[in-house]
Amino acid sequence: MRLLLINPNTTPAITDRVLAVARAAASPGVRLAAVTGRFGGRYIADRATYAIAGHAALDALASYPGRYDAVVLACFGDPGLLALKEVCPRPVVGMAEASLALAITLGRRVALVTGGEAWVPMLEEFVAAQGLSHRLAAVLAVAPTGADIARDPEGSLALLAEAVSDAVQRCGADVVVLGGAGLAGLAAPLAARVAVPVLDSVVCAIRMAEAVAGQPRGHRPGHRGGVKSTETVGLSAPLRDFLRRR
Amino acid sequence: MRLLLINPNTTPAITDRVLAVARAAASPGVRLAAVTGRFGGRYIADRATYAIAGHAALDALASYPGRYDAVVLACFGDPGLLALKEVCPRPVVGMAEASLALAITLGRRVALVTGGEAWVPMLEEFVAAQGLSHRLAAVLAVAPTGADIARDPEGSLALLAEAVSDAVQRCGADVVVLGGAGLAGLAAPLAARVAVPVLDSVVCAIRMAEAVAGQPRGHRPGHRGGVKSTETVGLSAPLRDFLRRR
Amino acid sequence: MRLLLINPNTTPAITDRVLAVARAAASPGVRLAAVTGRFGGRYIADRATYAIAGHAALDALASYPGRYDAVVLACFGDPGLLALKEVCPRPVVGMAEASLALAITLGRRVALVTGGEAWVPMLEEFVAAQGLSHRLAAVLAVAPTGADIARDPEGSLALLAEAVSDAVQRCGADVVVLGGAGLAGLAAPLAARVAVPVLDSVVCAIRMAEAVAGQPRGHRPGHRGGVKSTETVGLSAPLRDFLRRR
Amino acid sequence: MRLLLINPNTTPAITDRVLAVARAAASPGVRLAAVTGRFGGRYIADRATYAIAGHAALDALASYPGRYDAVVLACFGDPGLLALKEVCPRPVVGMAEASLALAITLGRRVALVTGGEAWVPMLEEFVAAQGLSHRLAAVLAVAPTGADIARDPEGSLALLAEAVSDAVQRCGADVVVLGGAGLAGLAAPLAARVAVPVLDSVVCAIRMAEAVAGQPRGHRPGHRGGVKSTETVGLSAPLRDFLRRR
Amino acid sequence: MRLLLINPNTTPAITDRVLAVARAAASPGVRLAAVTGRFGGRYIADRATYAIAGHAALDALASYPGRYDAVVLACFGDPGLLALKEVCPRPVVGMAEASLALAITLGRRVALVTGGEAWVPMLEEFVAAQGLSHRLAAVLAVAPTGADIARDPEGSLALLAEAVSDAVQRCGADVVVLGGAGLAGLAAPLAARVAVPVLDSVVCAIRMAEAVAGQPRGHRPGHRGGVKSTETVGLSAPLRDFLRRR
Amino acid sequence: MRLLLINPNTTPAITDRVLAVARAAASPGVRLAAVTGRFGGRYIADRATYAIAGHAALDALASYPGRYDAVVLACFGDPGLLALKEVCPRPVVGMAEASLALAITLGRRVALVTGGEAWVPMLEEFVAAQGLSHRLAAVLAVAPTGADIARDPEGSLALLAEAVSDAVQRCGADVVVLGGAGLAGLAAPLAARVAVPVLDSVVCAIRMAEAVAGQPRGHRPGHRGGVKSTETVGLSAPLRDFLRRR
């Protein structure tokens, strides 16, 4: 099985980090490849870079020359998720989408803990758009962004531990997701501090991608209205061709 | 990895059927065991046998002497799911719960198709209790129960195909779950008739059980209020001991 | 009019207590009988004993030889409620169901106060399943279970008074239900401390049972799918016959 | 026990009809009195007369010189219900409110059937404002208003039977409420045509008023903000005094 | 363009105040007229006077002899709004309705701040009835009523500033509406204290009335059921004729 | 007052058309300018071009050198709306957002009618994300896209008339919005066929932009988390500078 990871953050170091965590989590025999967005925010942490990332993720998918059985959109918050699902001939799972799907089988009320406060309303809206608000205990963010945390994981542990405790004690979560590439690998030390499961969003995404990779794909939702070919201007050649060719 | 399947229907032939489909779906290296409920309905198809099945599932879990990494509650509709999660030291996934979690990553609006009309309100209530009503396109049931379908799968295909088409065309589903042990193995022939994925609930359950088996378990929700030991009367010795020992 | 009380807790002393409060609350001419669950938790205070109680309540109903005009399921939280309604030829009201129905005519936002913290999520889910979450101010539980409170009502009054005040002042309830047989008879002393109605769940159940006893019954929801007879194994003879005879 | 019926329709013949049905439904020992609105629509069948009826119901309550243990607002749709509850020293139940409270203990999904099509959105909004939309199967209205039906009950039976069947077969109701004074007494002939309970809204209101009459009243919601006395202009002397005197 | 303001509070000084603020806010060329309710509360601050105000607003509309292109119901909370929309041949906007419509284009989560604590549940219910609860951050009220604030605006500024800060900091509002004629003109001083827009409900109502005045009117919702003429008793001659004439 | 229209469709002829309709709708003294997206779909009609359009709209805003008092995002469905609101120093209204805000003051249940079937789920999700699902009667699309309709308005009138009638008769809408630049100018002929208001989305957007242009702006939602400057790669120079400069 081959999984393609798309990191719409434009920082290759983050792609490398996600890939490393993903490799450790993947089942034997699963091969991973990853691509990085060619334009947009260094680290997506507001609505503007999030909007641009939807375009960048499509561009990255269209530009990837290899084969894959499923795609992981490796930015927690899943910019461009539905557009990718529309155009991609294989199953696509977003990192936040996959974490939620897995978390709701482990607990009744899920908390998302991430870095960067601007993500709070954005993730609340994402969960609502997923129709999962009834299962959400809270979205909590520490002040450092995921990029900051990735640069200094040890330095953020105390803040994150406080957020995780808060999620459980004050917000009533019985499962916590650590969201974002920057927080990958921190689930184990944080889990020791609370009495509920603490999940790593990269691990969840790999698990769910493996679970859906073998599933039937059927026709694609976006094709309902008969979309076959879209004329565009000003896009990269691969994306232009990708959208025209459908 | 070892998975334990609990079939709260009291018909061993159904357990065998689920186990066969599960074996075909499981990843290499996954070992499966299955237990059958000792009391209750031959095939759960109404609220009374559903209520009894919650007890029977607990009894079956407590009576199982072996080891396991995760449990699959192998009755679509998941009687006793939360009670099993409360008492079990390992992750438990229900067949309907797992199918929903997987289906919402493959489509926006999920239809459940099953056998036995009494299941329709019961499954609608289950989806609502899961907080997933916003993702539900419809619950549709053909008149024959899952037991009837298991006895004569070919004879039910036309009815089921009609329900699946109805789910997609009239109800707007873009992913369909075939729910129930009795319908196991029918996804492939039915998928050919519609342009959306058609999922097998047994396959989904195995996929999700594998996905959560390695996840951290943490403390258990039911232990919040400090439940440690429960005095009971009139239960089987294993269940009595299981509940007392906590 | 004859009302049958089913106490799925397996402690006869609790049945006696409920019956005594019920007798004081019943209108002239109403005759009461009560049966106790034959198996399950001494006092239902977690999901496992709750699940078993659904079976026990069915068993108790099937085993009762007398006549009745309506049934009261006398455990606050109503284990097995819908299954009882499905199989019973007369109206069935649950103690929590009845309390909610009555409370919403006396206030806009209802608080449930009970004993045993494991009940909090269970009752929140029950209210949601009843479609009444919009009328719920809060579910609050004191640490002692209903069984503890029944043994020492005076000793729990201060804790309960705090919970009732909290329900009103902090949660904005304008009507409070004291839920559970263990709290029966405590409404009067507690009502003196707050400016809103404080209802006794046993009294509410009797009131509502009297109100629906004379109502038309019609066919039963469970019979929609054409349920007529259910084959079972391993049940008590009365329950086996009860389910087969339908 | 004394119950006061307030009919905010300004047609005394309707008051008489409601009172007759109510007398037949009331328990032994319950004494009934009724007052008619002094101004407003002959028969409330649109939003304008509904709005005026809220005022008229308050005026009627304030003008009633006798004693009572509970009040029934005897117009299905309950104009002025919350205002009456605010100012009245005794419990007040509305005919639609009471019917819903009773119906949800007899079925999972309630249909309201009434006369006059303008009532459909008004009743849908009433149910939503009650927080009970999740239990509503449908609101169905026949073209003749309640006043028309009251004048010729036989002539409307076929239309109503069709609406009741529609509620059950097409909308999935498992309990039907015949709403409105004009439809009082028609439940019995209509119930024969469907397999679910058909309830009379006047009977429901009397049942619920009896159930709440003995309940503790506590302080009144409207008094939260410290309302003690309200200065008004241009009202009837009894209403002016009633509002000032609080 | 001519706008008619209906103040269902029966205090002409409040009408004058609203009219003055409205004049300052209206676009060039917009002519304003205002009428005051002839009966009911001096200042609407509870459910009883709110209910009466629905009648008074209809009476005021029917009594106004002039021409108008749109109507502003100038009491925040909009008593009688749907009845006015039903009977009026021109667009009608309520002050709370208009403020919400405008606020949701300026922020994601709206707080309403007003005077008089009894308004809190009433406005929460109004927002819910508008289907806008998902956009509501909070309804906050200071103890003085709008009438009190109108008499001494300076004296209430500190209390209101605290409520506005609370709305933003604690409740997460990103836009605040100052609701009520009594608070008109206070938006500017209060806006200086928080980092989000603070809107004046009178200004919002004028803006929205101008926006809808030129829009097509179509048939009126209330006319769906074929309402043409309504017989009434005991109303003022203009209202009687207005309702009969439809 | 100056309004800036951003058309994220990359077809200048559509920009011209929107501008012409907008000019006819704008109040005296309002000056309009318009910019066209530099990259993306010729006409946005699926999720992929919608996602790209969010980026293109930001790029267009950043590239506009002139002054403005408010911005209209002139693509019905509002791609990039929240990102524009986050970064723009002036109020931004989307064409769909504005149409909804205005429509809910003219009717209780709004239907959106547009061109291109892929828009149906996209607009349903947009309405849900706006928290306005409770006011939505339906989203209906005719098969021709807005671009097709713009090329041949007369040829689409019959199809659109059918959709509008369907919205009213079958879906219960009491106000209809014609969404999209391609449908601009068609409201008048279509309104003649139904008894409810039919609104033009361009007109609504201009009306609402005028209404909010004068309103206080406050700090911007996106700035909550302290976003000040965002480092990006691969963007146009104006957008790069725009995001860095914040």
Image (cartoon, coloured by chain):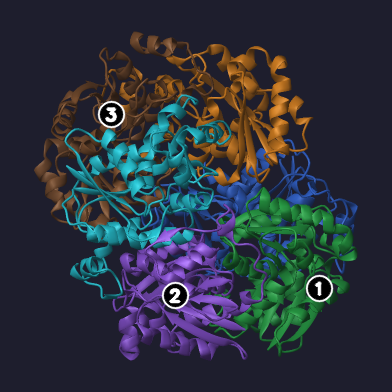
Chain colours: A orange, B blue, C green, D purple, E cyan, F brown
Q: Badge 3: how crowded within 10 Å, few (<14), some, or many (20+)? A: many
If the image is split into quadrants, where does the N terminus of chain A sit? top right
**Label 1 lies in what chain?**
C
User: Which circle, 3 or 2, is nearer the viewer?
Assistant: 2
Residue D187 shows in the view: no
Q: Badge 2: how crowded within 10 Å, few (<14), some, or many (20+)? A: many
Q: Nearer the viewer, residue D129 or D222?
A: D222
Cα distance between the residues tagged 1 and 2: 51 Å
Q: Position of residue F79 (x, y in %)?
A: 35, 30
Tell me: residue C37, above or below residue E43.
below
Label 2 sits on what residue type?
Answer: Ala
Q: Quick check: marks 1 and 2 in contact, CB under 8 Å?
A: no
Q: Are marks 1 and 2 on the same chain?
A: no
Q: Tell me the element at label 2.
A: helix
Cα distance between the residues tagged 3 and 2: 53 Å
Label 3 sits on what residue type?
Answer: Val
Please give left or right for residue E243 compared with residue A6 in the image.
left
**Label 3 lies in what chain?**
F
Please give left or right for residue B4 compared with residue E172 in the image.
right
Q: Which residue corresponds to mark 3?
A: F72
Q: Which residue corresponds to mark 2?
A: D60
Q: Which residue is pictured at 29% across the width and 14% down the height?
A: F63
User: Which circle, 1 or 2, is nearer the viewer?
Assistant: 2
Q: Position of residue E241 (x, y in %)?
A: 20, 69
Q: Tell me the element at label 3.
A: strand
Q: Which residue corresponds to mark 1?
A: C37
Q: Which residue is pictured at 43% across the width and 35% down the height?
A: A82
If the image is split into quadrants, where does the C terminus of chain A sit? top left
**Label 2 lies in what chain?**
D
